[in-house]
Image: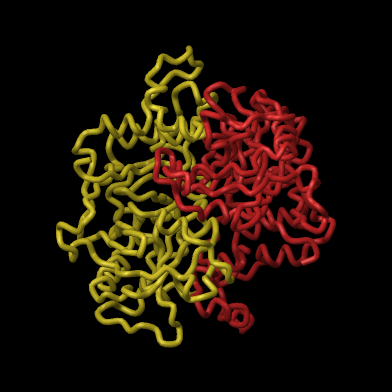
Chain colours: A red, B yellow
C-alpha cells in the first residue's frame, strides 16, 4: 500500500512492525497536512467500486513457487485474448518455461525448443497485430489529468493503464510494470501469443503501439520480477536448468471454483480510484516535505484485493 | 544494450544467439529506416567521451553473490557522500544486511538490530537533509529536451539523472532505477547514511526533493533487484535468515588496485550521449513500427563499461 510505501523509507526494520502504533501517537504540527492515503481510500471505498475478475478472461500461470494471475484485455486485443484462452485450453504452456529475465526490462516465457516447437491444436498460428484499437472500442476510459510524454492522453480503461490519440482516433494499452505483451518477429502479424512477456522494470513505453499488449499481472508479480537475471544475450538463460518451468497455464473458468483465486479490482472509473490517484499525486502528512503535484501514468496504483478480505 | 533490448521481444530463445548474423542478412524494405542504436553509438564514441569512476567517490558493496558498485554524487549530497566514505572506512556496514525488498519499489540495507544499533566511529550521527542543491552547484547539467511531468527541467549531471526548477534555482537527483537514496525518519535532518536503498522498480519520482539521493548503482543492480521480495510489512524480511548479509562496503580507493572494478561512464555532456538518447527516442529499423518521438528521463540509458573492453 502506498501509505506504508510512502513511509517505508522512514522506517527501520524492526520498527516497521511498530509503525502503525507509532503513527497513532499525536504527531508534531506538520507543514504538510495529513491527507487520505491509498490505504485509507481503499478502506473507505464502496463495494460497487470494485469488480471481480471475469474467470473467462483470467489466466492462472502456475510456477513451482506459486501462481501468477493475469487479467486479459479483450477490449484491446480481442484476437490475442481469444488465442490465449485457446492455448490455455489446449494446455499449450504446460511444461514450457520462463526463458528470459532481463534486468529492468521483462521476463519472457514460451517454448524453449525452437527446433521442434510444440504444435498448436485449436489455437491460431498467426494473428494480425493488435497494437492499437479504435477509441470507440475503449468504453471505460477515464482520463488522467496529468500530462504524459508518450501520448496525447493517458488514463485507465477498466483496470488497465491506457493511452489514446484523438487525432488518429486510436487507443492502446501502456507498457507499465506488470503489463503482459506478446512477443513478435519483425512482421506485425508474426505473433500468436505463444511467447509472452511481463514488464519487470521501469516502463518501456517505447514499445507502446509496436506490440500487442494482451493483459496485466494482477497477482504474483514477485514470482517473475525476482527471478535471477539471465546471463545470456537479452537476459536469456544460458543453461536449461536455469529456466523456471511452467507447471500449467489455465483459464480460471476451467479451474474448479475451490481452486480459484478470488480477486477483485478497483473500478478505474470510480470516485475512489480518482482518490487513489490524488493520494499519490499529492501525499499528505509530515514525512512528505514537497508533494509532487503530479503522477505519472505507470505510478498510479490499481488496487487489487482478495474478495471478502 | 538497447540495440538488443529493442530486438529482444522479437527473438525466440535459441535464435537470440543467431540474431547478429540474421541481422547481417539483407532486410526487406523497411518503412522505418535503420538508425544508429545505443550499441552503435557506444562503439563509435571517442575515448574522451568517457570518464573513469573516481575511486574516492566509488563504493563497493560486496554481497555473497557478488559486488554492487555505487558511484557517489558529492555535487548533490556532499555531506552524505562524505559520511558514506567515513562509514565505509569505519567498516560500519560489514556484517549488516539487506533488510528489505519491496516489489516494484526499493531494496534497502542497514542495521537489523534496532535495539542495540551498531555504534558510529568517525561518521556523523546526524546530517542536514540534502534534498536539493543550488543549481550553481550542478556544473555538468545537460538538458533533456523532452518534457517531464515532475520537474520544470530534467537532464543529466555528470552521469546522474537530475532535475531542476529555474524558478527556485534548485537542482536535485531523480529517483530513477538504480539510484541510491538515504532512508530518513520524519525529520529532514534525521538521516546519516546508515540506512540506504536502491530503486528496483518503476521510478518513484514522488520521492524527489523529499529525501537525499547520494548516488547511483553503476554495476551489480541484479544482485539487488532479483532478491526475493520480503513478505513482511513494506517488503521487510520476516526472518533474519531471509536477509542478504553484507560482506563489506569499501571505498574503491581503499581497495588494492588489483581488486578494483575498472569502470568508465559515458560523459553525459558528450555528443555521443546525446546520440544515445536519440537512439532510444526514435528507434530505427524494421522492428519498430512507431518510433516514440520522446524519451522519459528514467528511460535514458547511461552507458557504463569496463575500461579496455
Q: What residue is drawn where x is 39% and y is 70%? A: B245
Coordinates of residue A308 in the picture (x, y in percent): 80, 65
Return the residue found at the far top. Answer: B29
Return the residue found at the far bottom. Answer: B116
Quarter of the image for residue A232 reads top left
Tally the marks. 0
Left or right of residue A285, residue B172 in this image: left
**Which residue is more in the foreground, A42 or B91?**
B91
Q: Is residue B20 visible?
A: yes
Q: Is residue A98 above or below residue A168?
A: below
Q: Is residue A271 above or below residue B237?
A: above
Left or right of residue A209, residue A102 in this image: left
Quadrant of the drawing holding the N terminus of chain B: top left
Q: What residue is drawn where x is 24% and y is 79%? A: B122
Q: What residue is drawn where x is 32% and y is 29%? A: B40
**Which residue is more in the foreground, A105 or A146?**
A105
Q: Is residue A169 above or below residue B140?
A: above
Coordinates of residue B271 in the picture (x, y in percent): 28, 33
Q: Is residue B303 above or below residue B234?
A: above
Return the residue found at the far front. Answer: A116
Coordinates of residue A250 in the picture (x, y in percent): 72, 45
Quadrant of the drawing holding the C terminus of chain B: top left
Q: Is residue B292 visible?
A: no
Coordinates of residue A246 in the picture (x, y in percent): 61, 47
Return the residue found at the far right. Answer: A48
Amino acid at each position: 500500500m502506498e501509505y506504508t510505501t510512502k513511509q517505508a523509507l522512514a522506517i527501520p526494520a524492526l520498527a516497521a512492525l511498530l509503525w502503525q502504533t507509532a503513527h497513532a501517537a499525536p504527531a508534531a504540527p506538520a507543514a504538510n497536512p495529513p491527507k487520505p492515503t491509498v490505504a485509507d481510500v481503499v478502506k473507505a471505498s464502496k463495494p460497487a467500486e470494485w469488480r471481480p475478475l471475469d474467470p473467462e478472461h483470467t489466466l492462472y500461470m502456475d510456477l513451482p513457487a506459486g501462481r501468477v494471475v493475469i487479467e486479459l484485455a479483450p477490449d484491446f486485443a480481442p484476437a490475442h485474448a481469444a488465442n490465449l484462452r485457446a492455448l490455455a485450453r489446449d494446455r499449450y504452456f504446460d511444461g514450457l518455461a520462463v526463458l528470459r529475465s532481463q534486468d529492468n526490462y521483462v521476463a519472457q516465457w514460451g517454448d524453449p525448443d525452437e527446433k521442434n516447437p510444440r504444435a498448436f491444436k485449436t489455437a491460431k498460428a498467426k494473428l494480425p497485430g493488435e497494437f492499437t484499437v479504435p477509441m470507440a472500442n475503449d468504453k471505460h476510459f477515464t482520463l488522467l489529468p496529468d500530462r504524459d510524454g508518450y501520448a496525447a492522453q493517458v488514463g485507465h480503461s477498466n483496470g488497465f493503464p491506457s493511452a489514446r490519440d484523438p487525432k488518429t482516433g486510436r487507443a492502446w494499452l501502456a507498457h507499465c510494470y506488470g503489463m503482459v505483451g506478446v512477443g513478435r518477429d519483425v512482421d506485425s502479424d508474426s505473433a500468436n501469443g505463444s511467447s509472452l512477456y511481463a514488464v519487470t522494470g521501469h516502463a518501456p513505453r517505447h514499445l507502446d503501439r509496436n506490440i500487442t499488449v494482451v493483459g496485466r499481472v494482477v497477482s504474483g508479480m514477485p514470482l517473475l520480477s525476482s527471478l535471477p537475471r539471465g546471463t545470456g544475450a537479452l537476459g536469456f538463460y544460458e543453461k536449461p536448468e536455469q529456466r523456471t518451468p511452467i507447471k500449467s497455464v489455465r483459464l480460471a473458468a476451467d479451474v474448479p471454483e475451490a481452486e480459484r483465486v478470488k480477486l477483485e479490482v478497483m473500478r478505474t472509473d470510480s470516485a475512489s480510484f480518482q482518490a487513489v490517484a490524488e493520494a499519490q499525486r499529492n501525499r499528505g502528512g509530515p514525512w512528505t516535505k514537497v508533494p509532487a503535484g503530479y503522477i505519472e501514468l505507470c505510478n498510479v496504483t490499481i488496487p487489487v484485493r482478495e474478495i471478502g478480505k
